[in-house]
Amino acid sequence: MASGLIWQMASGYAYQTQSRDYKFYGTTKDCPYCQAKETLNHVFTYPSETTTSGWSTSNKQLLARLSSIHSPPAVTDAISHGILMWTQHHPSLPPFNPPTDNAVCPTDVCLRQAYSEQSWDVGWDQF
């Protein structure tokens, strides 16, 4: 359910943002709560109790699904950590690091590389 809503919002089918209102009704593009530019990323990561609660529920559902398909715990932990850091990260803070940042085991090194590519190249919002 949550992943369906995320897909709908990311694909533009089910969200109503100020940018969309601006396009169709000529209103402001700014967030009505903080006056920042309201982008889809802003909508996903806005630090309100409702957003945080929704992300927590969605993250639990994702972890349960990953567990049910027997995903390796290190991969599950990295995905959970990445999404959590993305939703709670403030632009003025330094970039966040993967849970296996100081590990030297070959598997952890590969996981760190994948995490970095997800963070820098792909983006956690694509998840």
Image (cartoon, rainbow, N blue to C red):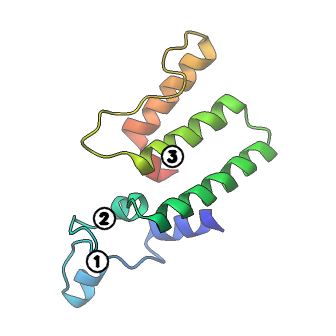
Measured as percent of width and height from the top left, residue 74 is found at 66, 29
The residue tagged 3 is 83
Q: Residue at x 60, y 12 (%)?
A: 106
Report the residue at 43% width, 76% height from top: 15
The residue that label 1 is drawn on is 18
User: Residue 6, percent across and down?
Assistant: 53, 64
Residue 39: image tag: 2
The outermost residue toward the front is 49
Q: How crowded is mark 2: few (under 14 residues within 10 Å), some or many (20 or more)?
A: some
Q: Is residue 39 above or below residue 25?
A: above
The three-letter code of the residue at mark 2 reads Thr
- Residue visible at 61% across and 52% down? 59
Q: Which of marks 2 and 3 is nearer the N terminus?
A: 2
Q: How many residues crowd around disc 3 within 10 Å: few (fewer than 14), some, or many (20 or more)?
A: some
- Which one is earlier in the sequence, the residue at label 1 or at label 2? 1
Q: How crowded is mark 1: few (under 14 residues within 10 Å), some or many (20 or more)?
A: many
Q: Is residue 51 left or right of residue 19?
A: right
Q: Quadrant of residue 119?
A: top left
For numbered disc 3, what is the local secondary structure? Answer: helix
Please give the name of the residue rendered at 42% of the width and 61% of the height, measured from the top-left corner: 44
Q: In which quarter of the image is the N terminus?
A: bottom right
Which of disc 3 and disc 1 is earlier in sequence? 1
Q: Is residue 8 above or below residue 24?
A: above
User: Which label number is shown at residue 37?
Assistant: none
Residues at discs 1 and 2 in contact (Cβ within 8 Å): no
Q: Which of 114 and 38 is in front in this view?
A: 38
Q: What residue type is labelled 3?
A: Ile
Whole-Å distance between the Cαs marked 2 and 3? 18 Å
Task: Say which element carries label 1.
Answer: helix
Find the distance from the CA under tag 1 to the CA under tag 3. Answer: 24 Å
Kind of residue sitting beneath label 1: Gln
